[in-house]
Amino acid sequence: MTLQLLEPPTQENCITFYGVSWEQFERIEVALEGITGVRLTYLDGTLDIMAPLSPEHEDSKSTIGLLLEAYLRENRIRFYVRGGPTLGSRAVGARGEPDESYNLETKKDIPDIAIEVVITSGGVDKLEKYKRWRVPEVWFWHKGKLAIYCLREQEKQFEYQKLAGSEFLPELDLVLLENCANRNDQYDAVNEFTQAIRQE
């Protein structure tokens, strides 16, 4: 008998469950705790279990984070990397984590900017979960493009508005950032981006 080595999957898989109570979600969360590459997102009874996080996902997340950090350093903007902290609670009916997140100027309980790489969609409304967490600005990276949403309050209702740029970083050239984020080599991408913003 010949044993065949299986290659690790290159695509992410997302399984969605509906009608999941908060108690059931917490039990699943405990059962899967410590398993590398598994991400849970819960919203109003809908549970997405994503695994594994693909190399494409991890590379995109890291590259966008490095580019943003390079911009902040070059412009002497104080920042704090929060990574992917678990956000949410039973009270708001949502829990999950961004891929990367940042506080600008001061440390806060909620990130100012959250970044999420979207490879597979899942069943959870991505903007709704961030709205519950009151994250002011969310960046979605999907198919090589960046979409930025800013939280607005109107008549005691919160909604996201899609904008052409960041409200926190209005001078940030998103076309340049996108072009560099799509480079194959992360090191070259950051160097090219840094040189370009120094010439602006």
Image (cartoon, helix red, strand yellow):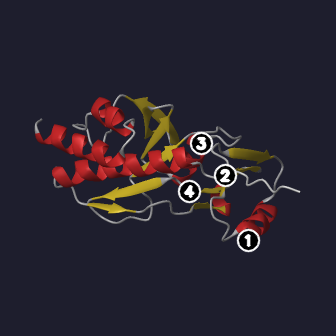
Residue under label 1: 30
What residue is at 23 percent from the left and 40 percent from the top?
A: 192
Between disc 3 and disc 1, the foreground one is: 1
Q: Helix, strand or loop at disc 2?
A: loop
Which label number is shown at residue 8? 2
Q: Amino acid at mark 1?
A: Val
Horizontal side, residue 200 vs residue 77: left or right: left
Indicate the position of residue 84 as horizontal and vertical percent values.
Answer: 50, 59
Crowding at mark 1 (Cα within 10 Å: few <14, some 14-19, many 20+)? few
Percent of width and height locating residue 61: 46, 49
Q: Is residue 46 left or right of residue 116?
A: right
Q: Earlier in the sequence, mark 3 or mark 2?
A: 2
Q: Tag 4, which secondary structure?
A: loop
Dot 2 crowding, Cα within 10 Å, few <14, some 14–19, many 20+: few
From the image, tell me which residue sits under label 3.
126
Give the Cα separation between the discs numbered 1 and 2. Answer: 25 Å
Q: Earlier in the sequence, mark 2 or mark 4?
A: 2
